[in-house]
Image: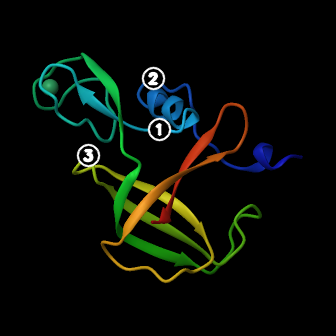
Amino acid sequence: MTQSQRRVLPETQDPDTGGFWEGARLGEIRVLECSSCGTLLHMPRAYCYRCGSWDNHWKAVAGTGRLHSWTVVEHQVHPDFPTPYTVVLVDLDAAPGARLVGYLDGAPELAVGQPMRARFENVDDDVTLPQWDPA
Ligand SMILES: [Zn+2]
């Protein structure tokens, strides 16, 4: 069994989030934006909660952010994630209100608000996972 067969991976063809995963394969961080009023639709959804429009588009934004929070996992629950590892929550610089999750090996020294930079983990031909490293 290969790693990608065991590992839990996102559904990259989902109608609400497929554009995010397509961007990740191209090395882009994307957010969904309402084409009528410009509202950030995060988490992605088919219609705008502000103006009710169903017209939206994916927009590539800078792969930079600030560390919002993190947790160090020390109890292993899956063979593909040896401990310790750190789950980070990053505020996107270019999309206030949008936060993305990432994975770091080990238990690095981190600080709230520190600059973070996206890296793209190519899992297989269909799935690339955006991750976040200290900048
Ligand atoms: Zn709108």
Q: Secondary structure at mark 2?
A: loop
Question: Which residue is tagged 1?
Answer: 28
At 57% from the left and 80% from the top, the residue drawn is 107
Mark 1–mark 2 Cα distance, whole angstroms, equals 18 Å
Indicate the quadrant where residue 13 lies: top right
Residue 68, image quadrant? bottom left
- The amino acid at mark 1 is Glu
Residue behind mark 3: 95
Q: Nearer the viewer, residue 98 or 108?
A: 108
Name above or below for residue 90 compared with residue 83.
Answer: above
> Does the residue at mark 3 contact the one at mark 2 (Cβ under 8 Å)?
no
- Residue 82 placed where, x, y %? 72, 71
Q: Amino acid at mark 3?
A: Ala
Q: Residue at x 49, y 28 (%)?
A: 18
Q: Is mark 3 within 8 Å of ligand 1?
A: no
Where is residue 2 drawn, in percent x and y? 86, 46
Q: Is residue 1 left or right of residue 115?
A: right
- Is the distance from the Cβ of mark 2 to the nearest ligand 1 atom less than 8 Å? no
Q: Amino acid at mark 2?
A: Pro
Give the quarter of the image for residue 60: top left
| 97 relative to 32, above or below | below
**Mark 2: few/some/many CA within 10 Å (<14, 14-19, 20+):** few
Crowd rating for badge 3 (residues with CA inside 10 Å; few <14, some 14–19, many 20+): some
Tag 3's secondary structure?
Answer: loop
Can you tell which of label 3 and label 2 is closer to the viewer? 3
Is 16 or 135 nearer to us in this picture? 135
> What is the spatial separation of the Cα atoms under label 1 and label 3, in whole angstroms?
14 Å
Tag on residue 15? 2
Cα separation between marks 3 and 2: 21 Å
Q: What crowding class fits label 1: few (fewer than 14 Cα within 10 Å), some (14-19), or many (20 or more)?
A: many
